[in-house]
Amino acid sequence: MNILWIFAHPEQHSLNGSLMSDALGALDGLGHAYQVSDLYAMKWKAVLDAGDFGDGPSVRERLFVGAEQERAYKTGELSADIRAEIEKLAWADVLVLHFPLWWFGPPAILKGWFDRVLVQGLGFGVKTPDGHTRRYGDGGLTGKRALVVTSVGARPPGFGPRGIHGHVDEVLFPLLHGTFWYTGMAPLKPFVAYGADRHDPADYARTSAALRQRLRTLPDEEPLTYRPEAGGEYDDELVLRPDLAPGRAGLGVHQR
Amino acid sequence: MNILWIFAHPEQHSLNGSLMSDALGALDGLGHAYQVSDLYAMKWKAVLDAGDFGDGPSVRERLFVGAEQERAYKTGELSADIRAEIEKLAWADVLVLHFPLWWFGPPAILKGWFDRVLVQGLGFGVKTPDGHTRRYGDGGLTGKRALVVTSVGARPPGFGPRGIHGHVDEVLFPLLHGTFWYTGMAPLKPFVAYGADRHDPADYARTSAALRQRLRTLPDEEPLTYRPEAGGEYDDELVLRPDLAPGRAGLGVHQR
């Protein structure tokens, strides 16, 4: 399989830097091909702005982000750094997002990768021939799998179903459901390195082994079972039908 | 009251740009003082890196982000742009974060504001005299209130309790609970402009009026009732006690 590994940490000599190095070695051993987008090393431009879209209309009175993205995507005028990432994405069967959890989300440099690369016409606003929007289980990235690899300072109970930080799968819902699943990718269960601030060599050996073991199942492990938009489980207002997860509410209802 | 309005949109002539302009007029009318951090106009640096921390140790073998933040915060060596934002924060009674929802979170430029400004020693890692970490209802920003003002293309049912996009309060949990509440701020219910892509002038007038009306209640509206870490509702593992929200799980259990 072809794996695109996107890494967002400012320090190569970090826990995450070491984990990536071990992980890439494991991918080699498993016979997978990979490309790495090391966003800090690439000095990736985090901020979406008018410079992403070529010259655009000769007089642009107002920037409409989605429309400009789609126009530039279709005319090949997206900036070269974005086009390069889109090519890597097209090549990949699996997307791995590897980052330390900062303020319960990806570092800005990685958020900007989503903002700038998942353009309208590819990441959203993708239509069927009869004009329906393809999203949530279908879209421009259908057929790919996506895995979060992240590190947190906390220990596991705090990120469990009733832990104070929020259940990690729900804290990551904007990424797992709102980005991966939205664009048609199959979201895999996140890999979380807990207690990252207190890793001694034995902890590190365990975490690295767990990650390498986890990578063995990349091709065929069961993704998270979110409900597709087009499957009849949501009504015309996009609300879950009352007979499904009856009487419940919250992010958990969107998983089967 | 003193209000810090943080704005993250690349286009001034946007729905959000107009809403901000109306809102600032309303704050004037209400007799509040405000400062604006217009992140795009300021060309705010989104990406946390070693340049944030002054020269640091003469030979820095490895960047430990939190420790470097705290050292530079205490010695006054944080970069000037970060220090300026921390001063505005210190001045403010209310923080307003105003942004279009991109991939179910803030644009990268705003995520980078959190990553860079809420440094260790101010935003996290703040200790009581006896060594307990102050967070979730207590911390370096205790006493302030925080409001999200955001826009989405979708209509309200899709962001409701069983809507396909996820209940908006839970989609924003990393911000409302993981950032505002974590640092000690009181999170207010988000203000969401729905159907932002299809606003005609009458829609705009309604949305603007609703926002201006909402700003009247800023000083005394009831914040979201998240549970404090120090209040005895969580056990030593930071798991909610079984007699509270019994039998339930998910992000909703953290609200009273």
Image: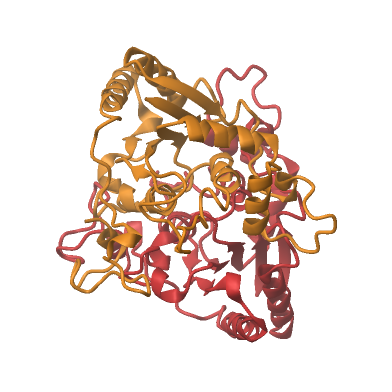
Chain colours: A orange, B red
Q: Quadrant of residue B17?
A: bottom right
Question: Is A169 left or right of B77, judged from the image as shown?
Answer: left
Q: Please tell me which residue lies in front, B19 or A233.
A: A233
Residue drawn at 38 percent across, 55 percent down: A136
**Residue beneath the point at 43% across and 34% down:** A95
Image position of B160 with respect to A122: above or below: below
Which quadrant, please, contains the N terminus of chain B?
Answer: bottom right
- Indicate whether B192 appears above or below A137: below
Pick the residue in front: A21 or B26.
A21
Residue A203 point in image, percent of width and height? 30, 23
Q: Give the mark count.
A: 0
Residue A11 horizontal/vertical position (percent): 55, 25
Front residue of B137/A15: it is: A15
| Residue B193 drawn above or below residue B185 | below
Residue A143 located left or right of residue B93:
left
Q: Residue furthest front?
A: A129
Instruction: Please name whichever residue, A34 or B204, is drawn nearer the observer in this view of the structure.
Output: A34
Quarter holding the C terminus of chain B is bottom left
| A170, above or below A185, in the image | below
Residue A66, x across and y down, in percent: 62, 57
Is A9 positioned to the left or the right of B31 in the image? Answer: left
Q: Residue shown at 37%/19% (left/top)?
A: A32
Q: Give percent across and percent down for residue A243.
A: 18, 72
Q: Residue at x 43, y 23 (%)?
A: A20
